[in-house]
């Protein structure tokens, strides 16, 4: 049985090479240093070093980016980011490592937002 599981994992990795087991992760906790609103996306720079969860697929890690898809989920995340910036409280993001978005689709995508009271 164990051999079957190993062979299946090898087959999947060969048949679907674009599939990544490390498709994201949590940013470090920090304060928002800059918000750059493009209309179709909001790019956020934190006070800490950004981590590359894209395995080099996104050309830049200067910003994390939240795509404006017009949903209530976008509005909620955006308001939470603005509130954290205005209140100068700590924040962290779940980064979708397999998605690049923002200006020229070169920044890692924000999936979730967590804020921390001081």
Image (cartoon, grey):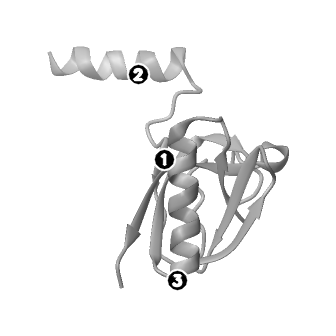
Residue 31 image point, x, y percent: 54, 79
Look at 14% across and 15% down and name the residue there.
1
What residue did someone put label 1 on?
24
Side of 50 where 34 appears, left or right: right
Depth check: 55 or 100 in front? 100
Residue 104, by quadrant, is: top right
Residue 26 image point, x, y percent: 44, 58
Q: CA distance from mark 3 to mark 1?
A: 25 Å
Look at 60% across and 80% down and name the residue there.
47
Q: CA distance from mark 1 to mark 2?
A: 21 Å
First in sequence: mark 1 vs mark 2:
2
Give SS at disc 1.
strand
First in sequence: mark 3 vs mark 1:
1
What residue did someone put label 2 on?
10
Number of numbered labels in the structure image: 3
CB under 8 Å between discs 1 and 2: no
Using a 10 Å C-alpha cutoff, classify the residue at mark 1 as few (fewer than 14 neighbours), some (14 to 19) or many (20 or more). Answer: many
Using a 10 Å C-alpha cutoff, classify the residue at mark 2 as few (fewer than 14 neighbours), some (14 to 19) or many (20 or more). Answer: few
What residue did someone put label 3 on?
88
Side of 12 where 5 appears, left or right: left
First in sequence: mark 2 vs mark 3:
2
Give SS at disc 3.
loop
Q: CA distance from mark 2 to mark 3?
A: 47 Å
Eye-nearest disc, 1 or 2:
1
Depth check: 16 or 66 in front? 66
CB under 8 Å between discs 2 and 3: no
Side of 38 where 19 appears, left or right: left
Look at 57% across and 24% down and name the residue there.
17
Look at 76% across and 64% down and name the residue there.
36
Residue 98 image point, x, y percent: 58, 39
């Amino acid at each position: 049985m164990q051999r079957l599981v190993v062979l299946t994992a090898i087959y999947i990795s060969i048949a679907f090479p674009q599939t990544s087991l490390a498709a994201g992760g949590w940013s470090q906790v920090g304060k928002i240093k800059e918000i750059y609103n493009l209309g179709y996306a909001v790019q956020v720079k934190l006070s800490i070093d950004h981590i590359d969860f894209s395995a080099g697929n996104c050309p830049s890690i200067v910003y994390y980016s939240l795509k404006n898809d017009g949903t209530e989920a976008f509005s909620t995340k955006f308001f939470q980011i603005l509130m954290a910036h205005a209140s100068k409280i700590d924040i962290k993001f779940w980064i979708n490592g397999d998605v690049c978005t923002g200006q020229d689709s070169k920044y890692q995508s924000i999936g979730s937002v967590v804020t921390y009271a001081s």
